[in-house]
Amino acid sequence: MPTAVLPPTSGAQGVRVSRSRAAHAGELAGIGWLGGLGVVERERVAADLRVVTVQPGELVCRIGRPVTYWFGVLDGLLKMSNDTALGMPITFTGLPPGGWFGEGTVLKREPYRYNIQALRKSVVAGIGVETFHWLLDRSIGFNRFVMNQLNERLGQFIAAREIDRITQPDARVARSLAALFHPLLYPGVGDLLRITQQELGYLVGLSRQRVNEALAALGAARLIRVEYGGVRVLDLAGLRGYPAAR
DNA sequence: GCATTAACACGTA
DNA sequence: TACGTGTTAATGC
């Protein structure tokens, strides 16, 4: 997605397993892909699932570290990024609630290839590598979910290349928002995306003031409604195609 | 011209 | 109180 420079991160050390806890029933109920599993599989996932709360700036996983978990965002907002040789971070995508990530790394049992960092206080779940492979080996429903996930995300990264070539700030904001509102990749978002204009600026690569102006334009176009601490989508197709062809 | 940073007042959680 | 928003002014490419 767009390149974005983020402010210096406070001493982010990575998440220790000792801080994790089991998921409660409400959190399990919010994980959509569990519904595609059988009883036995669901029970093993529930037993294996770990949950941590991460603070702003904290790293969920760091590039080069050995793979430990397949992660999901239960609440909050993360960003996926890498550092360039010059030390400038480039942001690939934001990860809002309902998003699961890291399956490519888990599949290959390779070190993480991206940094995943919390933009705000967030709740992150993870299942172990062995459980992930165990599910792949026996659950058609899980395979279907993972395949669909990979397919949808491929579409997102193609769209991200388009966004990169768009220079108009309003259009960049519109399409980046549309990506974050993806109902299959981020089913926890719903109609209201909790994101500050500052955070959106980090993801899109624009100043907060310019994001504010873009949001006002998109609101005037009846595509979104700007709310305190978030954005409500009114016309997802319109956002995705902004500015509308005529 | 247009986006950025800085700064401020104001409203909300 | 702390944070997020909306706005203006000065600065830079």
Image (cartoon, coloured by chain):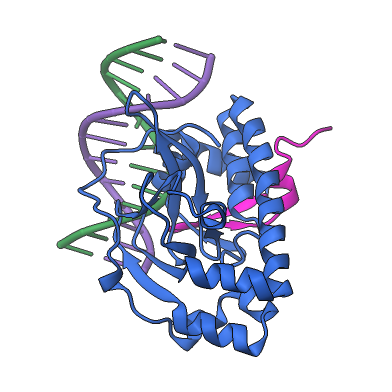
Chain colours: A blue, B purple, C green
- Position of A221 relative to A35 (above/below): above
Residue A144 image position (x, y, % from top left): 73, 66
- Position of A159 relative to A69 (above/below): above
- Looking at the image, which is closer to me, A226 or B9? A226
- Looking at the image, which is closer to me, A207 or A78? A78
**Residue span colored magenta:** A223-246
Was residue A242 drawn as part of the magenta stretch in this picture?
yes
- The count of marks equals 0
Tell me where residue A67 sits by quadrant. bottom left
- The residue sitting at 84% across, 32% down in the picture is A246
Residue A135 image position (x, y, % from top left): 61, 73
Residue A38 in sight here: yes
- Looking at the image, which is closer to me, A168 or A39? A39
Residue A47 image position (x, y, % from top left): 46, 84
- The residue sitting at 50% across, 55% down in the picture is A109
Was residue A187 drawn as part of the magenta stretch in this picture?
no
Tell me where residue A86 sits by quadrant. top left
- Position of A117 relative to A91 (above/below): below
With C2 as the anchor, is A172 left or right in this view? right
- The residue sitting at 59% across, 47% down in the picture is A177
Residue A70 image position (x, y, % from top left): 49, 63
Q: Which quadrant is the N terminus of chain A positioned in?
A: top right
